[in-house]
Image (cartoon, rainbow, N blue to C red):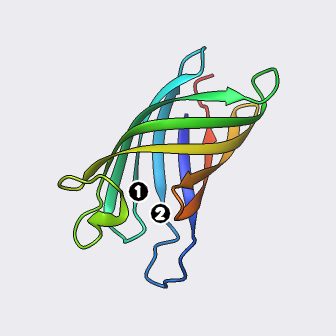
Amino acid sequence: MLQFGPYVYHRSEGTDRNSEPLLVGAEWESASRWEIGASYFENSFYQPSMYIYAGRRWFLGSGDEGFYVKLTGGLLYGYKEPHEDAIPVNYNGVGPVLIPAFGYQYQRANAQLVFLGTNGLMLTFGYDFWK
């Protein structure tokens, strides 16, 4: 699946936050809904960043379409000085994170709300070109 993240809503009122991360990513999902992926984006402080992860998706109800929840965990790279404290654990710009999401799948396309801790929400869109 290819993903694109055009927008982030930040809870804080600061005008110095990047609301257009231009996230691009690729993700592979097994038949049992386990997945691995990677994405590249500009973080909230305009720093180039990457997220490499594994996770799982659960549909709410039966079938392969409809609402779902997703949880991924992995390594986040890019939060460097002076913003290294933006993620709880950070060593030289790399830190472990867990990221939950809520989405809707329709045929080969999906839309997700990704929860960025207590700091914000990101909107992403995905399309499965290989189904």
Q: Nearer the viewer, residue 109 or 57?
A: 57
Relative image position of residue 86 (x, y in whole percent): 36, 64
Q: As shown in the figure, which amino acid type bears the numbered disc 2?
A: Pro
Rendered position, 83 above or below 51: below
Please provide percent x and percent y for residue 64: 75, 23
Residue displayed at 59% across by 31% down? 129
Position of 43 relative to 30 (above/below): below
The residue sitting at 47% across, 54% down in the picture is 23
Residue 58: mark in rendering = none
Tag 2 residue: 21
**Type of residue at label 1?**
Phe
Do the numbered discs 2 and 1 sit on residues whose CB atoms are within 8 Å?
yes
**Going 52% across and 71% down the picture, which residue do you hit?**
19
Q: Residue furthest left?
A: 92
Q: Alpha-carbon neighbours of circle 1 within 10 Å: few (<14), some, or many (≥20)?
A: many
- Give the Cα separation between the discs numbered 2 and 1: 5 Å
Q: Is residue 113 left or right of residue 44?
A: right
Q: Which element type, helix, strand or loop, lies under badge 1?
A: strand
How far from the left and from the top, in percent, is residue 88? Answer: 35, 56
Q: Earlier in the sequence, mark 2 or mark 1?
A: 2
What number of labels is visible? Answer: 2
| Residue receiving disc 1 | 41
The crowding category of the residue bearing disc 2, from other C-alpha atoms within 10 Å (few below 14, some 14 to 19, many at least 20), is many
Disc 2 secondary structure class: loop
Query: Which quadrant holds the N terminus?
Result: top right
Which one is in front, 68 or 117?
A: 117
Residue 126 sits above or below residue 64 on the image: below
Residue 12, placed above or below residue 66: below
Residue 130 is left or right of residue 55, and the answer is right
For the point 48% across and 60% down, the residue is 22
